[in-house]
Amino acid sequence: MAGKANEKIYDYFKSDPIILNGKFARYADDMWVQNRIDDRSRFEKLVDLYATAAIIGFRKGSRLADDKMSDDKRTIPLDVIAKGHYNRLYTIMQVILLLDDSRGLEAKEKARMAFDGGNKTEKDYTDNMELFHSYARGGLEHLHNVLVRRPVNPDDEFSDAKIANVMEFIKNPINNDEFL
Amino acid sequence: MKFKQITLVNFMRYKGENTLRFSTDDKMNVTAILGNNTFGKTTIAQAFRWGLYGEVTTTNYAKKEKAVLLSNEIIAGLDVNTPGEVRVEITVSDKASDTEHEYKFVRRQLFKRISQNPNNYDIQPVSNSRLSVLISADGVPSEEGPIDNDFSRRHPAGYVQDMINNMFPEKLSAYFFFDGERWNENKNKTDEVKRSINTILGVSSILKMKEHLKDGSKDYKTTVYQRLNRSIKGSSKESQDLKSKISANESTIARLEKDLEHYGQDYEVAKTDKERYAVILENNRSAEEDQKELKNLENRIESNKRRMEGNYRDFIQLFSKADKLLTSELLPSVERLFSQLDLKGKDIPGVTSDTIDWLIEHKKCLCGEELTPGHAHYEALMKLRDDVYPNKIGGPAKLLQSRLNDWANESADLIDKMHHKAIEYEDFQKEIGEAQMRSERIEERIDRRQNLQDVRKRYNRARQNEEEATRKKGETTGRIDSLKNNNHSLNVQLCELEAQDKANRPYVRAIEYVNALYEIAEKDIERLERPTIRELNDIIAGNFEKMFNSKDKYARLENDYKIHMYYRSLGGHSDFEETRLSNGELIAINFVYIVSILELAKKRQEKESKESGVLRLPLVLDAPFSNLSSENTHLVANKLPEFAEQVIIFMLDKDWEASGLKDYTLPDYCYRIYRDFSANSSTLTTDGGEF
């Protein structure tokens, strides 16, 4: 029984906090400020940024490996996820598991992954979380490019860079989206 | 002068070391400490008092004589031979010049238990408290190291305490360490007002003499005058009474004549001021208009910037939900995938694909049949495997569809809403840009040497003072005439009384001497007080106007040392005094009085030391809003950061929202007090309010 008590439960967004390393932590710092919204903020909370990054990374088909080259680190703790963000992240995870073609899975296998309500195997859990995080990292870099680095274009509707970039992005989030 | 931090070590309910850092930012100058009643907010205010002056004050919960300084938890662990230490460290920063001087004051005291009895928690001090200071310049501690208040080779005893009293005069501490219970005090504040003005003037010793001679006080319950009067006996008592009345009337007449003279001076001062300001205004008519417009533009830019910031916050809050829009857009793709699956399936209790996988793995069916590929039983089970959960996922799939539908509905007008906010944002930006350009154009041509708006205010004030002095001259002349008539009739009565008893004469002479001495003291004080009250009234008028932004009412400190509020009247009538003040007005007036006294003290000290910024006091407020409505809380709270250089405020959660102080507080400087009820101790964290 003692062994069972120590056994880790593998459940998406309930077992491990979300950690952003290296350049991804720095991207986050360029788009979010803790506890307040100021000129640098493009998102109110870090979890808002991460959720959007995951779905946009997936829709762009952009996956990136983690960056452990520096000690920069930002964390979304489990208690923050539990306070009103679990369903949000879990739903995005389900959609990604259902629609992701990068692993060559059959429709049935995808559905099994997406709706597997019970305890996952360590392998399924690790593989699927890495799938989610890799898309989120791709999305973070993409958001950084379009929301922070992008210069204002004369054709943009708005002239203030932070407003113009957000509006141009939300009006046309994906070019050549294969899922629509 | 700003408080940088305070550290409490085993002080009252704070066990161990607790440190509070205070905001020294010029704009975001508020530090808030939130906590429920009895959680320990007042204890921190007490730590300030003890740290600076070595004593605590009486509170709602305990008399100061009964206050136990050492944490109860620490006392419980002590024995009679091992003392426990209480320590408070207060760091003060002074950035008056280019150099930042830092003063770290440390007060400590040892206590021990007085009894071996484990249930007796009484303690006694081992010795007096010790005070020291460590001075640093730009972070570099002075070579001298910490200076002890009582045992220093280079400095006289009491050196550190004197330093504290120069920075934060104890006699004014009731104003900058402000207890919330006093906001709506309606009682006679005359004594307190007199005391504070006389403290600023430094005439407390003359006051003591007056109390001893005639006025009486808690120190002088029987005055010299009363004692002498009691000694007069017999028939001459009656004539002495008459004489006293005549003498009192004469004193009053003399005082009123003096007043009349002062009102005359006030009138002359006000008239000269009015004429001087009128000339300046006349010569700068267009410049005044420009300055006024510039001020309006600056206000408009400031308010538009705030609104633009609010608008950007709304914009970002909307965008922060973009993930729902982006995810719900994939619903058609999800439905296409579902169409490839048989969502219904068979619902056989307890049978899932895992059950069948287990049977296949063990190569034997429940009926005992061997399970090999191609075999009928094997194929039947594999078909069944496709029909059970999780391969058939009807329920969870519907749930996902429904959630994505909800997200799509929630996000339907997201882009429109963001678009609307974006347009508003750029409109504000445009307005600010235009106002800034207009300001720059005006700036190029105006004369900034003189603040004409300020001159206009001074002109108006001088005009009011002139009218006021005229009214008072009239009233005083009337009173003098009436007293003179009264004395005439008293003198007639006196003549009819018999000659004085010789035995009473020494007392009578002594009383005359007391009266003469008292009059001299009174004149001395008046001579010093008059200009001070005039100056204080100017400050009160300025602050009252800032507070209410009202032209139809004003506040003024009168001869009775009380603040009166008036409504201006038109057509030469005297102004109407409002005697039934609303709670809000009362609080505002008390607040204006507090900040005005501090401002006067600052100006006086600057005048004496011929340098500016010597006395710049922070405001430390303990539960100032506990008795106020939300509206009044907002009215007063919003002015605090403007009036004081630094605001440290202890308050209830319910008042935090209403106060609006969030706009002046950096998140790192909003603390929360937690109370451990079992140990009756408190701790501090920096997660105070919602930001």
Image (cartoon, coloured by chain):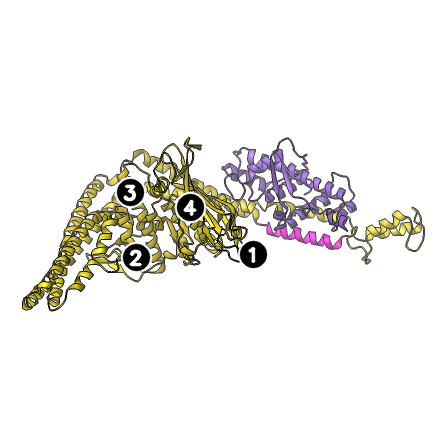
Q: Are marks 1 and 3 in contact (CB under 8 Å)?
A: no
Which amino acid lies under the numbered mark 2 shown in the image of this protein?
Lys
Report, in whole angstroms, how far the alpha carbon at label 2 lies from the one at label 3. Answer: 23 Å
For mark 2, give the secondary structure.
loop
Which quarter of the image is occupied by the N terminus of chain B? top left
Which amino acid lies under the numbered mark 3 shown in the image of this protein?
Lys
For mark 1, give the secondary structure.
loop
Residue A180 sits in which quadrant? top right
Q: Which mark is residue B129?
A: 4
Q: Residues within 10 Å of mark 4 (few under 14, many from 20)?
A: some
Report, in whole angstroms, how far the alpha carbon at label 3 lies from the one at label 4. Answer: 33 Å
- Span shown in magenta: B392-412
* Figure chain in purple: A
Residue at mark 1: B678
Q: Residues within 10 Å of mark 1 (few under 14, many from 20)?
A: few
- Comparing marks 2 and 3, which lies closer to the viewer? 2
Report, in whole angstroms, how far the alpha carbon at label 1 lies from the one at label 2. Answer: 42 Å
